[in-house]
Amino acid sequence: TASTFAAAAVATAPAAAAAAATAAAPAADGASKIRQMGGNAALRICSDQVVVDLRSALKELVENALDAGATKLEVRLKEHGAEMLEVTDNGRGISRENLDGVARRHHTSKLREFDDLGRLRSFGFRGEALSSLAALSSLSVATRTEDDAVGTSLSFGRDGEISARSKVARDVGTTVCVARLFEPFAVRRRELVRTAQLEMRKMLAALQAYALVCTAVRFSCVSLSAKTGRQSLLQTEGGAAGMRGAVASIFGAKQLSELIPLSGSTDRVTIHGFVSRPRAGHGRRASDRQYTFVNSRPVDFPRLARVVNDAFRASTAKSECFPFLLLNLEAPPDAYDVNVTPDKRTVFFVDEAALLGCIGEMVAKLFAAESCTFAVHTPDTLPLAPRPAAAAESSSSSSSSSS
């Protein structure tokens, strides 16, 4: 009867609870049994260490496009990137034989053995970017190579496997769409939506960094929002304008006029770029316009920035000023290590002390020469001094009396 079943259920409930507690409790020796973590759990835990915010998602997609030989790169955002981040390039595209593994973890065309890192010149090499984005969002890819008559559109599951495939008409190149980033993680998703505008500004600063150094590539960024409509956030010309043209496009002609070129070399590293003139009013209150690159890869190099900042402050007597700094260090792959942190922004040089010493001498000589220069006017450019008011009134009265 129903009462009999109910009594049995009540009687067995404590036993079931005790069994569950026993299963969850540590072993008699005080330690839980070590087991291999499930593949899906490991993927979800590790993916959000590769892609930690909107900026890092953009970084991975931009570097993939640059590695594909793109000369034109377009970024589209919806609701400041919280709803969609899309990157389109005109690179080589993804060949058909590589489509199945494009979002699988640790699948890459860049290297096979660890020793290949010593010869690597591409931005990416770990094979984690698209796999992580597939686990953290709704990921889709459309691509076409020169050998393909039509393009291919792919949708991916959380495990990085293709869930849908279709033909699509498109130009040669690749479009990667990341929709609803961090959707599987409710707390992080809410935080991204709440701070979407701030995250977009950080992402735009990262995109500007690539545009400053990858000057042969035409960059553009457009944001679409229900409140603000369509906004153009970035537009560069690319081509032969070089770093000067990129600085003028992004920060304006006034910023460019305040810069002087900086170049030199050590035995293995070539240095070139721009820095602010050591003049009053040419510095900034924050270090938001200081960019350091290694083989065109944006990196964090605080020790180098400190050398330049100290020299600038000594020349301007401004203790809290930061100069504009744009430096690209070109070095062979075996002269430095970029495989230090997941975002590849920390870099160690083989002979860092010699490099920093060379840069310190370069900056000191450059600033010393600038401190000894001053503007000279010719008769054609000499500004006219304003006439005193009394003299102007006397001249006016004498002319009226003579008439």
Image (cartoon, rainbow, N blue to C red):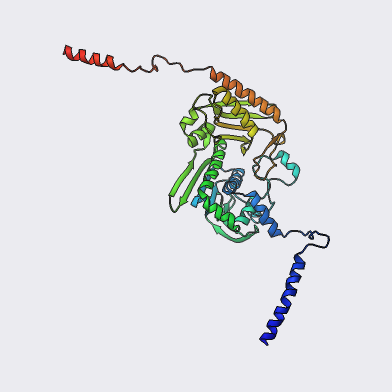
Q: Quadrant of the N terminus?
A: bottom right
Please report the residue visible at 50 percent of the width from the left and 48 percent of the height from the top: 197
Which x, y percent locates residue 272? 60, 29
Which x, y percent locates residue 132? 64, 53
Which x, y percent locates residue 88? 54, 48
Say which of 200 and 293 sits in front: 200
Vertical position of residue 101 compared to residue 305: above or below? below
Q: Is residue 311 visible?
A: yes
Which residue reaches farthest right?
A: 29
Which residue reaches farthest bottom?
A: 1
Q: Is residue 151 visible?
A: no
Answer with left or right where residue 227 lies relative to residue 47: left
Which x, y percent locates residue 379? 39, 14
Vertical position of residue 191 compared to residue 326: above or below? below
Please report the residue visible at 68 percent of the width from the left and 28 percent of the height from the top: 355
Numbered label tally: 0
Res. 67 image quadrant: top right
Q: Quadrant of the C terminus?
A: top left
Say which of 359 and 238 sits in front: 359
Vertical position of residue 113 compared to residue 302: above or below? below
Say which of 195 and 270 sits in front: 195
Please report the residue visible at 24 percent of the width from the left and 14 percent of the height from the top: 395
Res. 114 image quadrant: top right
Answer with left or right where residue 32 lies relative to residue 363: right
Please report the residue visible at 67 percent of the width from the left and 85 percent of the height from the top: 3
